[in-house]
Amino acid sequence: MERTRIDDIDSWMSPASSKRSVSKALGAEHLALNHYELAPGETFGFGYHRHAEQEELFYVLEGEATFETEEGDVTVGAGEAIRFAPGEWQLGRNAGDERVVALAIGAPAETGETEILRECPECGERREVRIEATEDRDALVAICEVCGAETVRHS
């Protein structure tokens, strides 16, 4: 048995104010469990994305998260959950004025190939991006696969 407190887990660099890997802290091998805190305007992921092999659930503990999906925006409030099947496009964000606290659960733990799309300022449209650490490892950046432009930086 393993046990931890959310506040004892280090936060990872991400688009969210706080992303804590509960599953890594507990040594879980078959599922991913992340605890998120999003300030207004922040997102769970680096862009509109889909996981080739991972099923993903989001359970909102506080606030209201809005998920961009292929069918349009879906709002999920405190006490509600949403599921995305492998291959389903999505991006969750805090579109409101209050903090969002949520759990993201994925199985299997490994996502397989993840495709991420972001608006590229150089190309003028959504393009596939890759995520890289900066040379000094103080930030993560999304790089357009078409033109090489940086589309966002998170530290």
Image: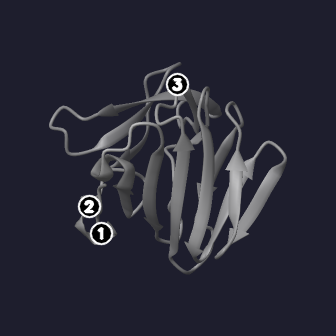
Give the distance between the C-alpha atoms of the residues marked 1 and 2, in whole angstroms: 7 Å
Q: Nearer the viewer, residue 48 or 23?
A: 23
Residue shown at the point (38%, 57%) measured from the top left: 19
Query: What's the residue type where badge 1 is placed?
Result: Arg
Tell me whether the residue at label 1 lies in contact with that at label 2, contact meaning CB atoms closer than 8 angstroms: yes
Q: How is the image coloured?
A: one colour
Q: Is the residue marked by circle 2 packed among few (<14), some (14-19), or many (20+) residues within 10 Å? A: some
Instruction: Name the side, left or right, on which 153 lies relative to 104.
Output: left
| Label 3 sits on residue | 112
* Residue 77 locus on image (x, y percent): 68, 73
- On screen, residue 120 versus residue 33, left or right, reads right
Q: CA distance from mark 3 to mark 2?
A: 25 Å
Give amino acid for label 2.
Answer: Ile
Residue 124: horizontal and vertical position, in percent? 62, 34
The disc labelled 3 sits on which kind of residue?
Answer: Gly
Label 3 vs label 1: CA separation?
Answer: 28 Å
N-terminal of the pair, mark 3 or mark 1, is: 1
Residue at image x 71%, y 67%?
76
Compared with 104, 131 (above or below) is: above
Q: Which mark is drawn over residue 9?
A: 2
Mark 3 vs mark 2: which is more N-terminal?
A: 2
**Up/down of 44 relative to 7, above or below:** above
User: 82 or 90, which is in the foreground?
Assistant: 82
Q: In which image quadrant can residue 48 be found?
A: top right
Q: In the rendering, which numbered label is found on residue 55? A: none
* Left or right position of 28 against 72: left
Q: Residue at x 47, y 67 (%)?
A: 38
| Residue farthest toward the bottom in the current orientation of the protein | 98
